[in-house]
Image (cartoon, grey):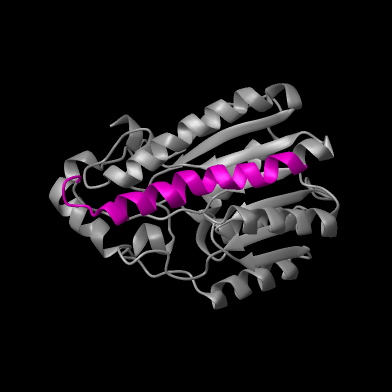
């Protein structure tokens, strides 16, 4: 028996990294998975390797190896109609929607006066507006199911403590805090809990293969320390542990859950 037997989880950014691991962990606990990922380069200004269609296919395979049912498609969180159709098809196939993990996002670097308009706008549109579209597409199905459930928004420690050369990213991640807090208040009496998760460095391509991050650390390293030099990078399981907990924590809503090795406090 799994903790999520018979339940359905919608996860964005599922092709690899955190999103893939969340899908595997939920499937291992009995959940059916609805998932999406653009599985391509989102913007020219990102400096880490993008997810691919092969990555998405591998996620589907890994979820199925856990015994999980999965409906996953390539698409963009900025495309509201795509997300609405995917959620509707997932609910038709699996019968309900219980949990949402709004995980998709991008990162790029640049000083506030040097970032292009496109760069700043892409960060806001993908990370913040795209997440709002994820919630707009999924909340009606959760309300119709009347099963309660949870929404977990993946923000960042940069949404708690702004970093240099991350003005667009930090703005989007601070915005996600406000989004999660407002929706938590709207859905509290509907038995749907809403929380945000705030990672620091995570062992994913975005987290450890971004050449611009290392350049930023060399220049502004005093702004980026953590309290745990012996554990500088979180694992994807560290993040999934938090996401699974928040999906089961019946007394927790409106929380800002830090998985940041203390970085936001120094």
The part of the image, by quadrant, that contains residue 206 is bottom left
Along the line of sight, which residue is nearer the eye, 43 or 79?
79
At which x and y percent is residue 175?
43, 35
Range of magenta residues: 112-141
Question: Where 104 sits versus 144, above or below?
Answer: below
* Residue 249 shows in the view: yes
User: x and y percent of residue 98 in the render?
Assistant: 76, 43
What is the x, y in percent for residue 81? 63, 55
In the image, is residue 142 above or below residue 249? Answer: below
In magenta stretch: residue 173: no
Q: In the image as oriented, which residue stretches furthest toward the left?
A: 219
Residue 210 relative to residue 219: left or right: right
Q: Residue at x 44, y 61 (%)?
A: 204
* Residue drawn at 64 percent across, 25 percent down: 186
Q: Is residue 19 above or below residue 265?
A: below
* Residue at the far front in the pictured view: 81
Instruction: Kindly indicate the quadrant of the structure image that contains residue 99.
Output: top right
Q: Is 76 in front, or is 200?
A: 76
Total tally of numbered discs in the picture? 0
Q: Position of residue 118 (x, y in %)?
A: 31, 56
260 up-or-down from 217: above or below: above
Location of the C terminus (image quadrant): top left
């Amino acid at each position: 028996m799994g903790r999520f037997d018979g339940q359905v989880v919608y996860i964005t950014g599922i092709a690899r990294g955190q999103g893939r691991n969340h899908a595997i962990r939920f499937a291992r606990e009995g959940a059916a998975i609805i998932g999406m990922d653009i599985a391509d380069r989102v913007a020219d200004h990102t400096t880490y390797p993008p997810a691919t269609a092969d990555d998405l296919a591998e996620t589907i395979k890994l979820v199925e190896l856990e015994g999980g049912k999965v409906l996953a498609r390539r698409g963009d969180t900025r495309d509201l109609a795509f997300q609405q159709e995917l959620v509707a098809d997932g609910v038709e196939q699996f019968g309900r929607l219980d949990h949402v993990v709004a995980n998709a996002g991008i990162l790029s670097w640049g000083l506030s006066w040097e970032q292009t308009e496109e760069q700043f706008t892409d960060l806001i549109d993908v990370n913040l507006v795209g997440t709002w579209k994820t919630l707009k597409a999924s909340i009606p199905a959760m309300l119709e199911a009347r099963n309660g459930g949870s929404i977990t928004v993946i923000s960042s420690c940069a949404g708690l403590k702004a970093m240099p050369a991350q003005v667009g990213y930090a703005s989007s991640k601070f915005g996600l805090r406000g989004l999660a807090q407002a929706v938590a208040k709207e859905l509290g009496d509907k038995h749907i809990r809403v929380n945000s998760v705030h990672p620091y460095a995570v062992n994913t391509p975005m987290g450890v293969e971004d050449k611009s991050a290392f350049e930023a650390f060399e220049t502004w390293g005093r702004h980026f320390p953590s309290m745990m030099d012996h554990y500088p990078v979180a694992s994807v399981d560290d993040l999934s542990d938090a996401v699974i907990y928040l999906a089961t924590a019946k007394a927790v809503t409106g929380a800002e859950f830090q998985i940041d090795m203390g970085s936001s406090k120094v």
